Amino acid sequence: MDWIFTQIERLLEAIARFLTAPVLPIGTKNLSIGVVIILFLLAIAVFIASRVISDWLKRKLLTRFDRGLREAIATITSYLLTILGFLILLQTAGIDLSTLTVVAGVLGIGVGFGLQNLASNFISGLTLLFEQPIKVGDFIEVEGLLGTVEKISIRSTVVRTNDDVFVIVPNLRLVEQNIINWSYGAPRCRIHIPVSVAYGTDTVLVTEALLAAARTEPMVLSYPTPKVWFREFGGSSLNFELLVWIDQPEESEPIKSSLNFSINYELQRRQIEVPFPQLDIRVRDTERLENLFRRRSPSHKQLDPMSNALPVESLASENEAHHYVSQLTSTAPNTAKRTTSISNLTLRELLRRVAYFEQCTDLEVRQLIEYGYRQLFPTGQIICRENEPGDCFYILLTGSVEVFSQRAEKYIATLHAGEFFGEMSLLLGVPRSATVRTLEECTLFIIDRNDLQKLLVNHHQLADQIARKLAERQQALRDMGLAIDMSTAETPFVWMRKQIHTLFGI
């Protein structure tokens, strides 16, 4: 039994001598294996502790900050705690840090030559964290790569694409390359949808179709309003471009797909042709073409010697040639006649029925279509309610509506095609003064508050008409309790006209 204890004591003494034997001289201090192991374990503990503290800060104290700033503060805190912990460990182990300066200088030279890329990526990572040209959560584009920044580390940045593929991008590329940060500042951005139509297509009709498609997409912003640009006269098509604003740039591709579906539907509904690349052939001398068909017909060689007539096969070939020539030379369009019912009228035709737009040119109508949009309301539907904030101006294109006050339980007026409503709330800065309900199926041209100014600038007669109508409704407004402070020296029309000038600068 004593022999066993003796052997154990010898083993422990050997282990102690091994652990206390100096193996790493640093300056005037010789570190033993045991100290090195303890320092290594403590360094791991410091690293883990710094990560835990930074994660706690991110989850608990920094929740009120946005994701990018939260991640940057947590990462920098983790780096600082790790460096501070290592310095404390070295001081505790009795290592004079001043003796490490020469070693650090030598290592710095080695890093500079042997680890240039790693050092560059490290410095670039610190630059990204401190300057924050991109942050975690930003949607960026770098060299054709689109994705969301998920993590910024010492060497690289993790970008998650729309297909949930994680791409590791070296930090140096994000510093040296031109980066498109769609989330920088305001996330609002404009996307372009190219559309080509056949030559001879009505450009106003194309504008109406593209804007109608844009306004059916819920992720497209209503302001700034969508625009249609006529890009160029292409080789076989008229090339347009639909421009819309969105505030979710990471959803740009799904939005483009949805818009393309809507555009295709609107073009087909209006019988607008999307052409293929084509080459038009015009035949001037049809007689030479007929003779060419006769000479190349195999039955033409088998003439009846007793007759000057061609055999039946030759006559058939000649008939086919005539039929082919008639198809090539036919210029009469084979299009179906459009019905003239209200439901099939274009927005341009409906606007031309309104008195103050009937003299507009096609270019003016196309611009007018950009200011608003058409919407169909069934019978008995409430268009706007009393006491609601006013944000739209309505022009009645077809049908009739009833205007009444729910508060006063009083009928006010019936409006028919060509009249407008909704201007009181916009011009007087008060909630809706009445409720408007359709008496039959109605088509309305709706203009947002932001586009009303542009409309009135280009159509002064409409501004005068609005002022005149407001002046006529002055007594009805007073009956409903809407006091209007007007100078006694001015007529109601002059006061209303000045109100429009004050609000819209017209």
Image (cartoon, rainbow, N blue to C red):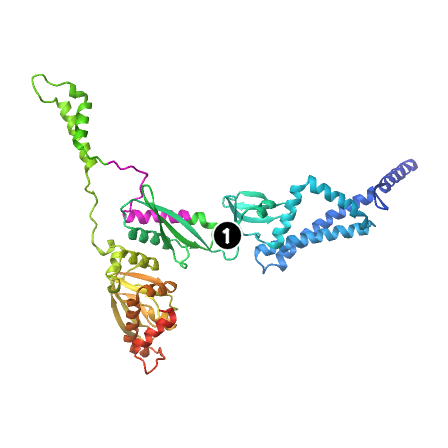
Vertical position of residue 172 compared to residue 476: above or below:
above
Q: Is 376 in the magenta?
A: no
Placement of the N terminus among the 4 image quadrants = top right
Q: Secondary structure at mark 1?
A: loop
Q: Which residue is tagged 1?
A: 182
The span picked out in magenta is: 256-281
Q: Position of residue 500 (x, y in %)?
A: 35, 71
Residue that protrudes farthest toward the top in the picture: 305
Under mark 1, the amino acid is Trp
At horizontal 82% and vertical 43% (from top left) the residue drawn is 34
Residue ID at (24%, 55%): 345
- At 24% from the left and 60% from the top, the residue drawn is 352
Q: Residue furthest left?
A: 306
Total marks in image: 1
Camera-nearest residue between 369 and 112? 112
The x and y percentages for residue 175 are 59, 48
Query: Vertically, is 81 above or below 317?
Result: below
Q: In the rendered view, tell whether residue 226 sits above or below residue 111.
A: below
Task: Inspect this view and state whether residue 152 appears.
Answer: yes
